[in-house]
Image (cartoon, grey):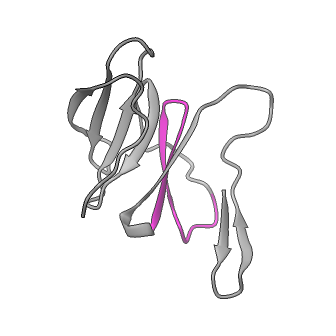
Amino acid sequence: LVRINTSTQSVDRVFTLIEANGNTQKLNIAIGNNGTSVYYAIDNDIYKLGIDVTALPSSKLFTTSGIYGLGTSYNQQIWVLQAPSFSSSGKVIKYSNAGTAIDSVSVGIGPNGVVFNP
């Protein structure tokens, strides 16, 4: 993950989210909090990274299962899209920005993105 200083048009931070060690890991990324945070999921662990920090978070925000997509809404909620298989319905689970599940809904096969209308 690279942060670019828009004043100088240069890279000023680089974060390695997944090490290239041969292990297969899933990565999902979403921008939240009106562009001031990056939420990312590595496998089933969700992390929050502020855009002004100098190091990756030392602990995960929360853990869930079956993540196939990730999104954030304008009111700072985290939306996890689950695809248990590609032959059955998926699920969208809405979490608070602290990682507490709020509600969920069954959706079609393979959900992986959300769009919000402000």
Q: Which residues are magenta?
A: 36-55
Q: Residue furthest right?
A: 21
Q: What residue is drawn where x is 57% and y is 67%?
A: 53
Q: Residue furthest top?
A: 87
Q: Is residue 49 or residue 58 the one in the foreground?
A: 49
Quadrant in which the C terminus appears? bottom left
Residue 83: x and y in percent read 41, 23
- In screen coordinates, is 111 left or right of 75? right
Q: Residue at x 31, y 55 (%)?
A: 73
Most common SS among magenta residues? strand
Picture coordinates of residue 41, whole percent (x, y): 51, 40
Residue 43 is covered by the magenta coloring: yes
Residue shown at 26% from the left, 40% from the top: 94
Name the image quarter holding residue 104: top left
Total numbered labels: 0
* 19 relative to 39, above or below: above
Query: Is residue 84 placed above or below 18 in the rendered structure?
Result: above
Residue at the farthest bottom position? 7
Is 53 on the left-hand or right-hand side of 79? Answer: right
Q: Is residue 15 above or below residue 96?
A: below
Residue 93 among magenta residues: no
**Residue in the picture at 63% in, 66% down:** 54
Q: Position of residue 89 (x, y in %)?
A: 32, 18
Image location of residue 103, percent across then percent down: 19, 35
